[in-house]
Image (cartoon, grey):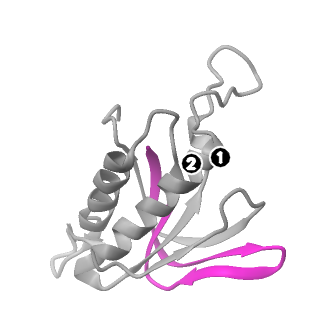
């Protein structure tokens, strides 16, 4: 499971002109589910997201988590995080999970994050979405449940 995590001042997701998720200060998580991912990957990445210390403390150091600052998380599914363009110009997505298991694990990640006490908003799985955000910092972190980066 892979995530691009951005610290934001605010963010929203729209599908067909309708807002599906909107947050103030917190995190936007673009989440990709891999072919071999399991519930364990979802739980690991949710815990890592909730406790990732990328918000400033009183001294201005990145030492606080989204839980510490009372922020929210907007989770948007993004299978293209498993795109492989190393050998061609058109990416291959064979390492992305099929839609059925991708959706199940995406929803499991959202449930696990909420169970940790994080307010969560979402996009719509497999929809064409427009995501607006104001990256705060900017701060962008890459996470991978296989710890490849």
Magenta segment, prevailing SS (helix, strand or loop): strand
Q: Quadrant of residue 82?
A: top right
Q: Which residue is mark 1?
A: 99
Q: Which residue is mark 2?
A: 102
Q: Is residue 101 left or right of residue 57?
A: right
- Residues tagged 2 and 1 counted as in contact (Cβ below 8 A): yes
Seen in the picture, residue 21 relative to 140 is either above or below; the reply is: below
Seen in the picture, residue 64 relative to 125 is either above or below; the reply is: below
Q: Position of residue 89 (x, y in %)?
A: 76, 22
| Residue 91 in sight from this viewpoint | yes
Q: Position of residue 123 (x, y in %)?
A: 63, 69
Identify which residue is drawn at 34% across, 60% down. Answer: 46
Q: Position of residue 7 (x, y in %)?
A: 43, 68
Q: Is residue 92 left or right of residue 57?
A: right
Residue 147 magenta-highlighted? no
Identify which residue is drawn at 40% across, 82% down. Answer: 119
Seen from the viewer's position, the closer of residues 41 and 131 is 41
Q: Which residues are magenta?
A: 1-29
């Amino acid at each position: 499971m892979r995530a691009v995590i951005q610290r934001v001042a605010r963010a929203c997701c729209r599908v067909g002109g309708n807002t599906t998720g909107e947050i103030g200060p917190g995190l936007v998580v673009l989440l990709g589910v891999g072919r071999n991912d399991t519930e364990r990957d979802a739980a690991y990445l949710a815990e890592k997201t909730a406790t990732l210390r990328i918000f400033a403390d009183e001294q201005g150091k990145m030492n606080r988590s989204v839980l510490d600052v009372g922020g929210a998380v907007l989770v948007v599914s993004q299978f293209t995080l498993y795109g492989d363009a190393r050998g061609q110009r058109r990416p291959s997505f064979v390492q992305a999970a099929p839609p059925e298991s991708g959706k199940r694990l995406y929803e499991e990640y959202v449930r696990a994050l909420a169970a940790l006490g994080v307010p969560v908003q979402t996009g719509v799985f497999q929809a064409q979405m427009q995501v607006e955000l104001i990256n705060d910092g900017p701060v962008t972190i890459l996470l991978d449940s296989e710890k490849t980066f």
